[in-house]
Image: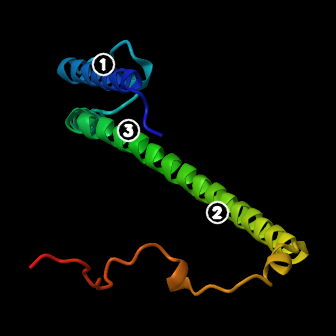
Amino acid sequence: MIPSKHGFLKDIERIRSLSTIIDKKLSEVKPSDAEKIDKLTLEELQDLDKIAGIADFMLTKYADKKEMCSILKNFTSVITETADSMSDLDDEISELILSAEDSISKVKDLHARIDDKSDFKKKYSDGPEYDYTQTSSINLTNFVTEINTVE
């Protein structure tokens, strides 16, 4: 996990203070106050100074990349959570569709049963049969013969 900006600054300060102590030790070539550094040879101190310098350079150079990585991780988590919630919504919608289809089927079955039990068609089916064109609305496409025309 990427440390916070506060932790990053603390790391840089620690490396810089260590580098300062090493520089001081190298310039004096005398024992310093730090016990660990006192035990190192001149060659080890030079190597450690190079490593501390490279670490300082790398941390400073890529500090913005570290923040960008943190931002991208947050963005990725938002996208992942959104995709998960969309999947949940898809499941809920599928369940609602199935429920609606079941309800529609029940209504159709009920309608068919009522229609079968109803004697409405039976009672009124013995009346006169009309052709659809005879009982439909006015047909304006028929030609009319004019009566009492003035010529």
Comparing labels 3 and 2, the label whose residue is closer to the camera: 2
- Colouring rule applied to residues: rainbow
Secondary structure under the numbered disc 1 in the rendered image: helix
Counting other residues with Cα less than 10 Å from the Cα at mark 3, is it few (<14), some (14-19), or many (20 or more)?
A: some
In the foreground, 71 or 44: 71
Asked if one can make out residue 46 in the rendered structure from this viewpoint, the answer is no
Comparing labels 1 and 3, the label whose residue is closer to the camera: 3
Residue appearing at x 83%, y 72% in the figure: 120
In the foreground, 111 or 149: 149
The tally of labels here is: 3
Counting other residues with Cα less than 10 Å from the Cα at mark 2, is it few (<14), some (14-19), or many (20 or more)?
A: few
Confirm or deny contact between disc 1 and disc 2 (CB under 8 A): no
Q: Quadrant of residue 48?
A: top left
The spot of residue 36 in percent (x, y) is 43, 24
Q: Which residue is mark 3?
A: 70
Which amino acid, mark 1? Answer: Ser
Up the image or down, 83 lies above or below 14; here it is: below
On residue 25, the disc is none
Secondary structure under the numbered disc 3 in the rendered image: helix
Secondary structure under the numbered disc 2 in the rendered image: helix
Name which of mark 3 and mark 2 comes first in the sequence: 3
Q: Give the Cα distance between marks 1 and 2.
A: 62 Å
Which amino acid, mark 2? Answer: Ser
